[in-house]
Amino acid sequence: MAYFDPHSAFLAPRRAAARPVDHTAFSSLEWTVILLAAGDTLRSLRTPSRLSRALGTVLGRGTESSLADPRLEALRRAAVFAWRKASVPAAEVERFLQAGFEPAQLNVLATSVAAATANQGRRQ
């Protein structure tokens, strides 16, 4: 004899409605990287020389380093250019796209940073 539990229908996982994939969205971690890049300079994009690393160690300054995740580092680099109002070089665009981001996301990044800097200017 088969047994039917009417409450099991509530316990079974429901299928999520198929949502269209938004190719312009960033995750919360990615937005955090974008916001933190506001404090970085264009100089942070250069690889430090051996001498600069040694002096940083001796003087206790440390060195600015890149992010361990290559995808997030590509995002950080693009965001630094956006925050510094510099055009993103073709090599950086290629790195951004190779990291798995979409071209539309680069536009979202640029417009979001431009809007944020415009809002900061109005507040001051």
Image (cartoon, rainbow, N blue to C red):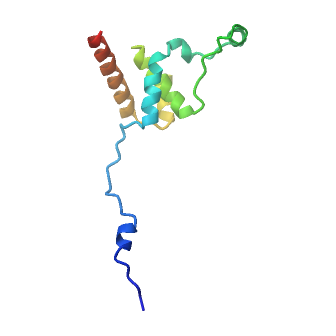
**Residue in view at x 41 percent, y 85 percent:** 3
Which quadrant is the N terminus positioned in?
A: bottom left
Which quadrant is the C terminus positioned in?
A: top left
Q: Is residue 25 above or below residue 62?
A: below
Question: Where on the picture, by quarter, is residue 31?
Answer: top left
Question: Residue lying farthest left?
Answer: 122
Residue 2 makes an appearance in the image: yes
Question: Residue lying farthest bottom?
Answer: 1
**Residue in view at x 36 percent, y 33 percent:** 104
**Residue in view at x 26 percent, y 12 percent:** 122
Residue 90 makes an appearance in the image: no
Tell me how many marks there are.
Answer: 0
The image position of residue 36, as x and y in percent, is 47, 23
Q: Is residue 59 above or below residue 17?
A: above
The one nearer the camera, 23 or 122, is 122
Q: Is residue 32 above or below residue 56?
A: below
89 sits to left or right of 44: left
The image position of residue 40, as x and y in percent, is 50, 16
The image position of residue 99, as x and y in percent, is 51, 35
117 sits to left or right of 65: left
Question: Where on the picture, by quarter, is residue 6?
Answer: bottom left
Question: Where on the picture, by quarter, is residue 116?
Answer: top left
65 sits to left or right of 35: right
